[in-house]
Amino acid sequence: MEANKASFSLQGYKFTKINLDLEDIPSNVTFSLDFNPSGEYIKKENTYNLNFVFQASFDANSGRRIAVDVHCKAEFKFNESLNFEDIPSFFYPNSIAIVFPYIRSLVSTLTLQANTKPMILPTINLFPLQSILKEHTVLK
């Protein structure tokens, strides 16, 4: 029996913004990790562009400070033409899960190469982000 093809595939990704502010971070700091996904479905091309923003911030004397700010854009292609409403529900959590390891790796590598304590992002359950992504998806 032939396996079913995936209904979508990752076509590529790129980092569009990377900002590190690693100066004078206390050694015992606890970072707040924030994820902000959004997307656009381009029906005539059967593609979905995922915009995934990651930020690590902490409380500093001068207020909240962002230490790491990463913006990633990923393009997914659907195997068939879909109406906006017919995007499968499993797409949203899976698209995030596919892109997150690239962000995780980038953050670890950049902080290590910056000759600071590397920021190793833990394995995170990103499943709750699916509703945010779905709400912040537009049709183009």
Image (cartoon, rainbow, N blue to C red):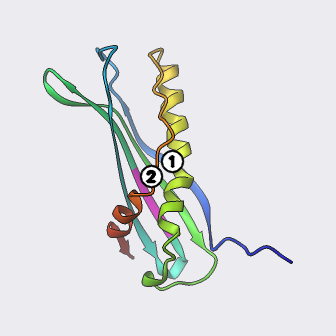
Q: Which amino acid does label 2 sit on?
A: Leu
Looking at the magenta stretch, what is its main secondary structure?
Answer: strand
**Would residue 40 be counted in the magenta stretch?**
no
Give the answer, above or below, for where 140 lies relative to 117.
Answer: below
The reply to whether the C-beta atoms of the residues labelled 2 and 1 are less than 8 Å apart is yes
Residue 126's mark?
2
Q: Give the class, few, some or many, for how many residues have Cα within 10 Å of label 1's Cα (few <14, many ≥20).
A: some
Q: Quadrant of the N terminus?
A: bottom right
Residue 40's mark?
none
Residue drawn at point x = 52 percent, y = 68 percent: 91
Q: Position of residue 101 (x, y in %)?
A: 55, 44
Label 2 sits on a secondary structure element that is loop
Q: Closest to the observer: 102 or 11?
A: 102
Give the answer, above or below, for where 112 lies relative to 72.
Answer: above
Label 1 sits on a secondary structure element that is helix
From which residue to which does the magenta span run? 48-52
Of labels 2 and 1, earlier in sequence is: 1
Q: Closest to the observer: 12 or 63?
A: 63
Spot the residue most to the left. Answer: 62
Q: Position of residue 74 (x, y in %)?
A: 51, 57
Residue linked to disc 1: 100
Q: What residue type is labelled 1?
A: Phe
